[in-house]
Amino acid sequence: MKILRVVMLSLVVALTPLSAEQEPQIDIQQLLTDFAREGSSSDVSMRIIHLNDVTTDALFDPPQKFVLRAQARNQTMFLVTGIALRDTEIDIDFQLVETAALGQQTYRVYSTSWENMETGTQLSEGDEFTGILSLEQLIPLRSRMALVQGNFLRFQWEFAPNVLRQLEDAQD
């Protein structure tokens, strides 16, 4: 009986650190509310998610989450998912407009296709596309950002103070 107690106590002690290290449960709906924007034109429907420590941890598995998190700490990045609403040629020519205390600045946005997300790709109705939009630099999170594609699509981010605190806490 003593041996059984010692074995049980050993298991409790051995398993406790594993439980303590488990990541907290992520509320995906809240994550999408805070960091994702959706929009559509007559040709495509898109969801664009701002990539940062919180979103990369929630949406990706190792090792990809570590690579994307490191990149997102050095340059502004967005995950793009979308679907063609009709037969179309996709156009991923976006610009990012930053509005900060000192005025407004426009940046060129680069795209990396994971699936069907290259400008000029012919999509049939229902075809999905995925990829990354990124800048060469990191835009401060306190700035208002808008990804703009022509006159058809506009996705805006202006993070609330509680979201900014969450991002600061995630980097610690």
Image (cartoon, rainbow, N blue to C red):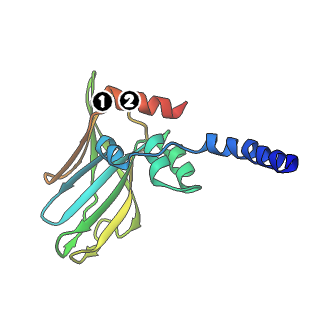
Q: Amino acid at mark 2?
A: Leu
**Labelled pair 2, 1 in contact (Cβ < 8 Å):** yes
Residue 56 position in % (x across, y down) = 47, 48
Residue 67 position in % (x across, y down) = 55, 51
Q: Nearer the viewer, residue 3 or 63?
A: 3
Horizontal arrangement in the rendering, residue 144 relative to residue 21 (left or right):
left
Q: Which residue is mark 2?
A: 164
Q: Which residue is mark 1?
A: 160
Answer few, some or many: residues within 10 Å of disc 2's Cα (few below 14, many 20 plus, some between 14 and 19).
Answer: some
Horizontal arrangement in the rendering, residue 37 relative to residue 7 (left or right):
left
Residue 101, placed above or below residue 42:
above
Answer few, some or many: residues within 10 Å of disc 1's Cα (few below 14, many 20 plus, some between 14 and 19).
Answer: few
Q: Amino acid at mark 1?
A: Ala
Numbered label tally: 2
Q: Quadrant of the C terminus?
A: top right
Residue at left offset 14%, top offset 54%: 152
